[in-house]
Every structure is written in C-alpha cells, then in structure tokens.
C-alpha cells in the first residue's frame, strides 16, 4: 500500500475540520461517541465519558489509522475497504508495534489546525507529544521538501546596434606613468619660472644702484 502524500493528508484534515460532528447517545458505560467524517478520506471517532473527558480517539487518514486510549497510549494500523454483502465496510489491520512514520504523518497533517473543535485539538495535542517523544528517542523526522530549482542566470545582452562601445579600462600602471610625466613637466616649469624671476630680480637690483 502506497503512502499518502502530505498534501493529500492535509487536505483531508482541512475537510475534517469543516465537517459537522455527530454525537451519539450514551452507552451502557455512560460514554457517548462524537463522530467527525469528511469526504476527503479523514475520520475522527471520539469517545467521551459522562464528565466530558476524552477517553479514546480513532483517527483515520487516507487508509492510515491512529488510535489513542487513555492510560494505554497510541497504536497504529491501516484501514482496508472491503465489500461485505454488497456493502462497503472498513477493516482495521493493527500494526504489531506503533509505526513512527504513520504517527509523524498524522502529526504533520494536524500541526496547522487553528480551529476550536475540542476533539480535533485533543488528538492534535496527543500526536504533537508523540512526535516530540519520537524526536527525543532519535527517530528521524520527515525531511523537508527540497527547495525549488534556481533559475539559470540570464545571458549577457548583446549591445544595441548603433550604441557606442564601452570605453576600455585603463590599467593602473598607465595611470601611474601619466601622473609621473605630468609631475615632471610641472617641476620643470616651476624651475624655469624661478630662474626667470631670479634674473629679473638681479637686473632690478643693478638698475636701482
């Protein structure tokens, strides 16, 4: 039997949260049943004592079965649809030991529930605690879905026809050589100006004397 996808399981839980619960009459032990059923393959059957405390819950999600009983804990199994006397019936095949993958899938499906239904909230808390216990015991949690592939970088655009070509980059060595030449010319000019000034000054001195 193939495992249900997480998306289908979450859709089943969403449909279950919208389903109207049906309450049954109290039994001989005083317990009454509260039944949630959706057309997406999710079902929650809760048994409540006369004081309103939940004593047992059976959660079915797309063929997977989780049962919680007060004082006992969680069990898992699978549900098989059979045709008995032309009437479709469900047969639960319990697992010998609780299957962590079934518990984790159910816990992940219920983790986003934000409604106020006390019975769905109860099984949500039960499965969340079971998930924490499995994590502490070293059972690997389901891996998150891989990130979407990154788009390849766009190729460089070709230059537009008629657009001016970009100016070539000037290497640093060429800039340094040009600065040295400019500094040399400026130094020579300053020397010439000083020499001319000195000659003019001497000539004025002789003229005044």
Image: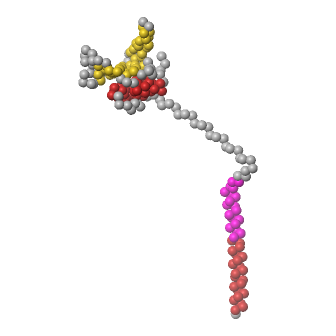
Looking at the picture, the colour scheme in use is secondary structure
The residue closer to the viewer here, 84 or 166, is 84
Q: Position of residue 73 (x, y in %)?
A: 32, 22
Farthest right residue? Answer: 162
Residue 65 falls inside the magenta stretch: no
Residue located 69% across and 56% down the image: 170
**Image coords of residue 64 (percent x, y):** 42, 19
Residue at x 42%, y 16% (from the top left corner): 79
Residue at 68% across / 59% down in the picture? Answer: 175
Q: Is residue 41 left or right of residue 119?
A: right
Quadrant of the rendered structure where residue 36 is? top left
- For the image shown, how many numbered marks are present on the structure? 0
Q: Is residue 171 magenta?
A: yes
Q: Quadrant of the C terminus?
A: bottom right
Q: Is residue 170 left or right of residue 49?
A: right
Closest to the observer, 196 or 74: 74
Whole-percent x and y of residue 111? 40, 30
Residue closest to the eye, 56 or 137:
56
Quarter-wise, where is residue 114 in the image?
Answer: top left
Q: Is residue 196 above or below residue 91?
A: below
Q: Is residue 44 left or right of residue 163?
A: left
Can see residue 2? yes
Q: Is 8 located above or below residue 189 in the figure?
A: above
Where does the magenta region start and end? 167-186
Residue 130 in view in this figure: no
As drawn, which residue projects farthest toward the bottom? 209
Dominant secondary-structure state across the stretch colored magenta: helix
Depth check, front residue: 52 or 169: 52
């Amino acid at each position: 039997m193939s495992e249900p996808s997480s998306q289908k399981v979450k859709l089943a839980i969403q449909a279950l949260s919208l389903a109207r619960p049906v309450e049954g009459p109290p039994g001989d032990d005083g317990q009454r049943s509260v039944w949630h059923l959706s057309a997406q393959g999710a079902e929650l059957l809760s048994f409540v004592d006369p004081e309103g405390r939940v004593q047992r819950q059976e959660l079915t999600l797309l063929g997977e079965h989780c049962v919680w009983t007060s004082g006992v804990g969680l069990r898992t199994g699978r549900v098989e649809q059979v045709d008995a006397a032309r009437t479709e019936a469900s047969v639960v095949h319990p697992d010998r030991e609780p299957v962590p993958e079934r518990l984790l899938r159910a816990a992940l499906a219920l983790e986003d529930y934000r409604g106020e239904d006390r019975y769905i909230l109860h099984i949500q808390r039960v499965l969340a605690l079971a998930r924490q216990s499995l994590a502490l015991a070293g059972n690997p949690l389901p891996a998150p879905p891989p990130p979407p592939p990154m788009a390849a970088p766009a190729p460089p655009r070709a230059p537009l026809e008629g657009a001016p070509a970009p100016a070539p980059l000037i290497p640093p060595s060429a800039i340094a050589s040009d600065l040295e030449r400019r500094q040399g010319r400026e130094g020579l000019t300053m020397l010439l100006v000083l020499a001319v000034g000195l000659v003019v000054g001497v000539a004025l001195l002789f003229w005044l004397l």
